[in-house]
Image: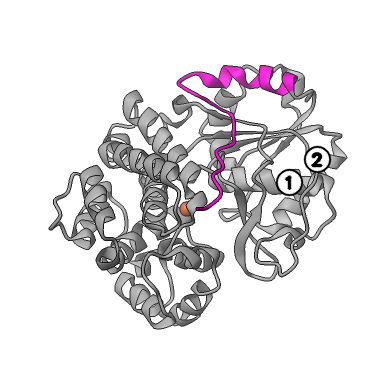
Amino acid sequence: MSVLQFLTTVHFDHGMRRQLPQLLASEGVQRPLLVTDQGVMAAGVFAQATEHLPAHSRLAVFTEVPLNPTEAAALAGAQRFKDLGCDGVVGVGGGAVLDLAKAIAVLATHPAPLWDYCNRHPQAKRIGATPPLVLMPTTAGTGSEVGRSAVIVFDNGIKAGVRCPDLVSAAICDPELTLGLPPGITASTGMDALSHCIETFCSPVVNPPADAISLDGMQRVFAHIERAVHQGHDRDARWNMMMGSLEGAISFQKGLGAVHALSHPLGALGFHHGTLNAILLPHVLAFNRPALGDKWLALTRQAGWTVDTCPRQALMELLRRLGLPTQLQHLGVAHEALASVAAQALEDNAHKTTPRAVSQADYLQLLQDAF
Ligand SMILES: [Fe+2]
């Protein structure tokens, strides 16, 4: 039996952003560092998310968030936190922003380098007291607001997690913040959420509560992703996508699998996490299919498939309906990079919980299939 841990306080519903001032006050935060990115700013979503904050709480803003959050960006954010005399951190954005906000909170009270706290470090240091941290997702994808780690590209080129399960003071999930999200980002982040639900359900780690949550999340994403993509202002679809994303991340404490083992090293090359997962998922699920036993039946029920459905074909058709790319080469991945990615996948934490044994040659074949 694995450890069961369902921790983060989540304020979830349309309009829940109104809770932000109260949450910060209850944590004693007067001067938060607001972490967001240029895209969230330009779309007006940052202004919407923080509209209930008094003006003096909106002065310290950090927007230098790379597509994949880096160790250097975390250090720069922590420096800004100290320079501006901040006493808390608020992340407003997609997974990159939320993960970076976590890393900034760690470095605000702990000495660099961040690598010392990485779960790939042979003797990772413990994380002690950190400033209050409130996370507000503006996509329905990573579920980083309740995830147990911050995934960072370190200075040594490795993309991996800083395990920080106690870091988040509260999450505010307000689906209204996603109503204007463009179709492409809705689709790619939504496929990240789906890959979390599927991979963690298929993980062999025993955790029935997490299985139940991942199945519920899977059903919500399968049932609502197309509406969320093609009718972005559908409030019900957005609500369900955000809940599916949250459920994927609550449950992926069971561990993920080959999709993420491959997308982490590919992401370190600069490609978008959700889009990579969308492309990899059909091939990985087809590979895992013979090892899934009864889980396959449960999965097909959530997807609206039959037991005989070919997962590769069904998911590829879904990608086409969502307008997503279906091959890694469409993203600009170089064929020469595949061998090294296959080797790195074996070192990734997600590799430890694949439902079917995967060799380096298998990883390379999966990459070739997805290329
Ligand atoms: Fe992911």
Q: Is residue 345 above or below residue 56?
A: below
Residue 344: in sight, yes or no?
yes
Coordinates of residue 43 in the picture (x, y in percent): 51, 33
| Mark 1 or mark 2: whose residue is earlier in sequence | 2
The reply to whether the magenta stretch includes residue 3 is: yes
Q: Position of residue 339 (x, y in %)?
A: 46, 82
User: How would you rate the neighbour count of disc 2 (Cα within 10 Å): few for under 14, some for 14-19, many for 20 or more?
Assistant: many
Q: Which amino acid does label 2 sit on?
A: Phe
Residue 83 relative to residue 95: left or right: right
Quarter of the image where one finds residue 168: top right
The label number, if any, that marks residue 81 in the structure image: 2
Q: Name the residue under label 1.
A: 104
Disc 1 residue type (three-letter): Ile
* Residue 87, quarter of the rendered image: top right
Residue, x 23% and y 62% (percent of image)? 312
Q: What element carries label 2?
A: helix
Q: Dot 1, crowdedness within 10 Å: few (<14), some or many (≥20)?
A: many
Q: Nearer the viewer, residue 51 or 42?
A: 51
Residue 8 in the image: above or below residue 161: above
Disc 1 to disc 2, how far (Cα)? 8 Å
| Front position among marks 1 and 2 | 1
Q: Where is residue 265 in the image (x, y as percent from the top left)?
A: 52, 68
Q: Is residue 308 magenta?
A: no
Compare residues 116 and 296 and report the one nearer the observer: 296
Q: Residue at x 50, y 75 (%)?
A: 346
Indicate the secondary structure of the residue bearing disc 1: helix
